């Protein structure tokens, strides 16, 4: 819980009563490896903060190939925020790659926080903006770099992830085949 409180306090000032209110609206959720936090074709039920584990955002392209769009590790929010807020059907999956533990908020509880705490919407907007900026910073180089550089950047951005994530998902995220990734890994050892 302390990590969560420290995270949200980066984006605004909250007093102890406000923090208690927020924590009272949270539930703990455990996901086993390969379970979905949110599924394409369904309305997201929760916004979550990842306490332990790794998740990924993925979708299927027009060739029915599974594409990993991004990874989220500990002490970060996990949600399709726009679809959650608007209660619209999600277009991608959020899947646990490892066993995960999350603090989750239902739509009702998330809205109650926003309706009770003055300035919460500003904090929420800054959190969403931060999540989007992180995702862009991680994805942007993948467009212009060669495969080896993309892999080295991935290791830099997610130092502990390479040993926790299946190589097939890393390859998908990097936009290369698993065979190419194996060659790259062999060449840089």
Image (cartoon, helix red, strand yellow):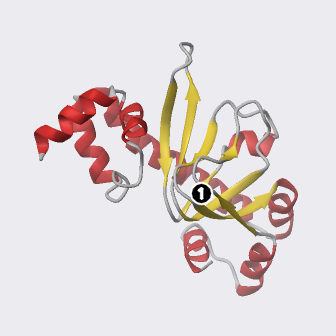
Q: Residue at x 22, y 28 (%)?
A: 146
Q: Is residue 145 visible?
A: no
Q: In the rendered view, does 13 fall on the left or right side of 26?
A: left
- The answer to which image quadrant residue 64 occupies is top right
**Relative image position of residue 143 (x, y in whole percent):** 33, 28
Relative vertical location of residue 103 with respect to residue 65 in this rendering, above or below: below
Relative vertical location of residue 185 with respect to residue 6 in this rendering, above or below: above
63 and 23: which one is in front? 63
Q: In the rendered view, does 23 fall on the left or right side of 153?
A: right
Q: Residue at x 60, y 69 (%)?
A: 8
Q: Is residue 187 visible?
A: yes
41 and 16: which one is in front? 41
Please, which residue is most extreme toward the bottom here? 16
**Relative image position of residue 120 (x, y in whole percent):** 73, 64
- Tell me the quarter of the image containing the N terminus: bottom right
Q: Where is mark 1, residue-wise?
A: 77
Q: Residue at x 48, y 47 (%)?
A: 71
**Relative image position of residue 134 (x, y in whole percent):** 45, 49
């Amino acid at each position: 819980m302390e990590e969560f409180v420290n995270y949200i306090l980066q984006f605004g000032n909250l007093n102890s009563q406000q923090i208690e209110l927020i924590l009272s609206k949270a539930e703990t959720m455990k996901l086993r490896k390969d379970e979905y936090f949110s599924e394409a074709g369904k309305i997201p039920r929760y916004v979550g903060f990842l306490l332990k584990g790794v998740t990924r955002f993925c979708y299927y392209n027009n060739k029915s190939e599974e594409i990993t769009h991004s990874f989220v590790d500990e002490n970060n929010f996990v949600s399709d925020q726009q679809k959650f807020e608007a209660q619209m059907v999600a277009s991608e999956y959020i899947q646990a790659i490892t066993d995960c533990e999350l603090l989750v908020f239902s739509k009702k509880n998330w809205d109650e926080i926003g309706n009770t705490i003055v300035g919460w919407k500003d904090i929420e907007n800054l959190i969403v903006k931060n999540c989007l900026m992180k995702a862009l910073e991680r994805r942007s180089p993948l467009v212009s770099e060669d495969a080896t550089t993309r892999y080295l950047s991935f290791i830099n951005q997610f130092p502990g992830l390479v040993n926790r994530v299946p190589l097939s998902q890393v390859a998908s995220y990097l936009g290369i085949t698993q065979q190419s990734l194996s060659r790259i890994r062999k060449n840089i050892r």
